[in-house]
Image: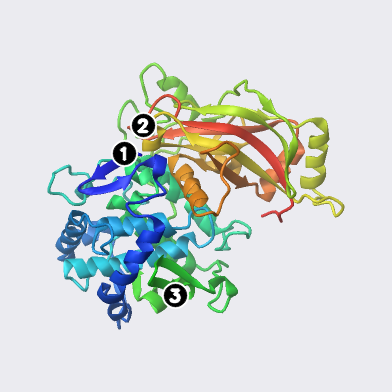
Amino acid sequence: MTQRQYHGLVIQGRQTMHRSVFTRRDFLKGASALLATALPGQRLLAQTSAARRLDWNTFRNTRDYGSLVDGISRMRENTNASDKRSWAYWTNVHLNFCPHGIAYFLAWHRGYLYYFEQQLRAVSGNKALVLPYWDYYNTPEIPGEFTNPSPFNSLYLSRQNSNVIDALSLAPFAGTVTNMQRGLTNPFEVLMEDQPHNPVHNIIGSTMATMQSPTDPIFWLHHANVDRLWSAWQQAGGGRTTPSAGSTYWAGTFTYASRLTMQRSRTIDTRSQLSYYYQNETMPTSLPAAQTAQAGTGNFMLASMRQDDMALQLAQLGPRTSGAAPRLLARPAVADLAASPSRQISGSRLSVGGVLRIPLNENSISVKLQPDQASADLLQRTLGATAPQATGPYRSALVVLDSVRISGNGDMGGYFYHLYLDLPSSTDVSSANAYRIGSVGPFEIAAAEHRVHMRQDAGGSEPGTVTLTFALNRELSALVAADPRNVTLSFVRVSGNSAPGGEVIRVGEARLELSTETPQ
């Protein structure tokens, strides 16, 4: 069993990361007695006027800044993980109950921030204190107050990187994204979690790349920004819809501790139910322009940027600049790896081919998923223009990464991989999103490990591994149907200024599957 210590907090390392200081049962038992008498919830829940959560650049110049720093300091100094006034207590809430990669990711975290904010007010003694947010679409560098390594700075924690510019995307805010929940076409929740949420965790790295991410004070500002962006999307109009309060979608409650729950319907919006709003509630319309760092790299590094491989990396993905020149993305070379056969995975899923043992390191890589002729014919019948066939059981396609594990020193993050399907040999980065199906990094793996622990997922085929599944939309399914014998999967590495080299992730198998589920 491994342990890492962060300013007096002792939490478990990755090998046993699903166990916090207490087991889930112990945590619930302790929380039951503590929350009943001490949490200021019921008094503070009924605020008569809405509080305004401020952008960090505004907040740090207010009188509440001192209360925030003092409150965080007091909570981090409290090493009793069973005490709701401690920092570790709220990390354990996340470890024991947070949903990632499943429904209610946005709504559960909205309630989580809300209850944490109440506790921060109580510890600091400032009942007017609100959580600020970090608007990285405007300022992608972690605020300096969080990167000062002074031993007296309660906002500091060692991190791999501080700039998240290349973790950002405008995809969730496109006019075509009109559905909020999972299971529908272009769901905002899925797109928002996929990028920017997950890559921000990955690029910052260290504890932020794990389910123990609330240990890092920047976590709370990151999630306040995610909540803000969801609120902005909800208010933007243009056909964007959230299930109504009377929908069965909101039936039931979220659990944060045994006696700390919240009706799901309270998280529909921030103003009417939770009595707060944000300083800026508009969606971003552009990505921030990078400041030129070294040799014109624009702060974008595809890998570790050693002089001998700089040309290769910039050929794969050109630097971000403030000019109008396109950033070209070249499809990585195809690796010669062993193929896996077509086979029945379950009663509802059929593998139509894949490849085995994919090593992911500082270089980008492509692999060929080459179905045999019979599987290719089935793909065309299922995914083609006239599909789905009424006579066939399959209706949609998935890319599945099976038996995925962290390798070497990859668990500390500082990097992630864009995952593309049938990426052209060279394309403008702004157009590449049409071929993107998701991202892979230590945070996605940690979230999958968490789902296994919560018995929401069975895990990978090999012991101690996980499975990552990516549903193909109709456009990518049609692309597969057009040339089913030559399906290319590309892993494009994105690294911060500090990122590990060598193998960091091992994928046991990448395969293309047909599923009986309705296509998105």
Q: Is mark 3 on a helix, strand or loop?
A: helix
Eye-nearest disc, 1 or 3: 3
Name the image quarter holding the C terminus. Answer: bottom right
| Circle number at residue 499 | 2
Name the image quarter holding the N terminus. Answer: top left
Q: Tell me, yes or no, whether the two marked residues, 1 and 2, touch with CB atoms within 8 Å.
A: yes
Residue type for callout 3: Arg
Residue type for callout 2: Ala
Name which of mark 1 and mark 2 comes first in the sequence.
1
Residue 308 percent coordinates (x, y): 39, 16
Disc 1 target residue: 161
Residue 64 percent coordinates (x, y): 18, 65
Residue found at the far top of this picture: 308
Residue 452 percent coordinates (x, y): 52, 49
In the figure, residue 433 lies in which quadrant?
top right
Q: Is residue 426 left or right of residue 11?
A: right
Disc 3 target residue: 266
Q: In this view, does 314 lie to the left or right of 465?
A: left
Residue 442 percent coordinates (x, y): 44, 40
Pointer 1: residues within 10 angstroms few (<14), some, or many (20+)? many
What whole-number distance in Å separates the C-alpha atoms at marks 1 and 2? 8 Å
| Circle number at residue 79 | none
